[in-house]
Image: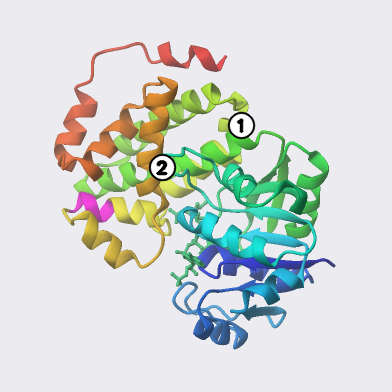
């Protein structure tokens, strides 16, 4: 049994806390809202996981120093845009080094940093035992129903990855390890862009052909960028690559797919975000990936087209025409780098 603190009590922070509490760990989840801590201590988190009774061992606090002092394993489960702010608060209260596990799927626009890089920028090296990323095809809504789920714990140091594997693994939550942190973080973040695009074509009334096209060519452009950034090509055929792409592009649980679907049906981005009430990571990550594609000189036509829809006022139907009317090419020509 380990002592663990989870920071962030949205859908994913709560679902992972559910797993950790069921695994018998001494678990404390921190939320920045006092009323939500009270609700969780009464075994529910209705806004995020409707109708689910949380286990008795799942305790919450809104007192950040208490959560920092509780454990030396910290699971960061806030949206990408809150990572730096939460790290700063944690750092101010740390008195000994800790293992950081992050579960967020995004890239920071402008700095173009991955989450593990942001954590290492905000927390002094002497306070970091290691940083492990936990990622893969895993809707919170299904995890708390104890449906079979597989994810990957990634860290260059295999011992740290195995520690996280042991922490989370149980009969419905199976954890693999991988050393390729870049590939795992890029796959997890960029699949959200493709899920938004698939949501749009579904919203426009197109079918499985369009979905398969976006998923296949989407994976090609994600892998192309990832490999240029130093990822291992094979990671993109694993759980955090094609696995997470499948789960996010084909499920109404996905906030990214749902947001895209509403855009495809004609809603404005502002209205969509208002209606969601939960994080849609793919929006900011589209901006970051668009900038990364330029920085690494990698063609990413789906990302560029979605960028034009989200930030330059191009209509969803124009976007489809734009993608379908691209210059003819050989399917494999940009994939040669992956070999
Ligand atoms: N949901 C899922 O199935 C999965 C999600 N993920 C990833 O996990 C990350 C978190 O997602 P998820 O839990 O779903 O998101 P949600 O939108 O469900 O919840 C986000 C939580 O973070 C809190 N939060 C937001 N900003 C801050 C801040 N500045 N300080 C403290 N807390 C803050 C929110 O508080 P408030 O309630 O006040 O808004 C909320 O509790 C994302 O990167 C997502 O991609 C990964 C795998 C699966
Ligand atoms: O990452 C996820 C599943 O693996 C959840 O995706 P959404 O953020 O689109 O809901």
Task: State left or right for residue 250 relative to residue 273.
Answer: right
Q: Quadrant of residue 12?
A: bottom right
- Looking at the rendering, the stretch of residues picked out in magenta corresponds to 261-265
The answer to whether residue 51 is left or right of residue 329 is right
Residue at 19% across, 28% down: 322
Q: Residue at x 45, y 54 (%)?
A: 81
The answer to whether the beta carbon of the residue marked 2 is less than 8 Å from any atom of ligand 1 is: no
Is residue 265 visible in the rendered image? The answer is yes
- Which label is found at residue 235? 1
| Element assignment for label 1 | helix
Give the alpha-carbon distance from disc 1 to disc 2, as whole Å.
23 Å
State the residue position of label 2: 109
Spot occupied by residue 206 in the image (x, y as percentages of width and height): 23, 42
One can see residue 139 in this view: no
Residue 331 horizontal side relative to residue 2, left or right: left
Q: Position of residue 40 (x, y in %)?
A: 58, 82
């Amino acid at each position: 049994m380990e002592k663990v603190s989870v920071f962030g009590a949205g859908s994913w922070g709560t679902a992972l806390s559910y797993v950790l509490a069921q695994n018998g760990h001494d678990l404390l989840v921190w939320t920045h809202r006092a009323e939500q801590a009270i609700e969780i201590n009464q075994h529910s988190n209705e806004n995020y996981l409707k109708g689910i009774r949380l286990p008795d061992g799942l305790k919450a606090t809104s007192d950040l120093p208490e959560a920092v002092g509780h454990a030396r394993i910290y699971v960061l489960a806030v949206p990408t845009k809150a990572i730096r702010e939460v790290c700063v608060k944690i750092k101010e209260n740390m008195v000994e080094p800790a293992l950081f596990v992050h579960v967020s799927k995004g890239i920071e626009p402008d700095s173009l940093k991955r989450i593990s890089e942001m954590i290492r920028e905000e927390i002094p090296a002497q306070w970091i035992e290691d940083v492990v990323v936990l990622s893969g095809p895993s809707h919170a809504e299904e995890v708390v129903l104890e449906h079979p789920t597989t994810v990957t714990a990634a860290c260059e140091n295999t011992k740290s990855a195995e520690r996280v594997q042991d922490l989370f693994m149980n009969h419905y939550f199976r954890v693999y390890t991988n050393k390729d942190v870049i590939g795992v973080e890029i796959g997890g973040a960029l699949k959200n862009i493709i899920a938004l695009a698939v949501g749009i074509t579904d919203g426009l009334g197109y079918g499985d052909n369009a979905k398969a096209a976006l998923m296949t060519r989407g994976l090609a452009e994600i892998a192309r960028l990832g490999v240029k950034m130093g990822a291992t090509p094979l990671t993109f055929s694993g759980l955090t690559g094609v696995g997470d792409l499948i789960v996010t592009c084909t499920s109404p649980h996905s906030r990214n797919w749902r947001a895209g679907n509403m855009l495809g049906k004609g809603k404005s981005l502002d209205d969509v975000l208002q209606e969601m009430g939960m994080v849609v990571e793919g929006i900011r990550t589209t901006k970051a990936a668009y900038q990364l594609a330029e920085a690494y000189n990698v063609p990413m036509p789906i990302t560029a087209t979605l960028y034009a829809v989200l930030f330059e006022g191009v209509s969803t139907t124009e976007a489809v025409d734009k993608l379908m009317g691209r210059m003819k090419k050989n399917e494999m020509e940009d994939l040669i780098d992956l070999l």
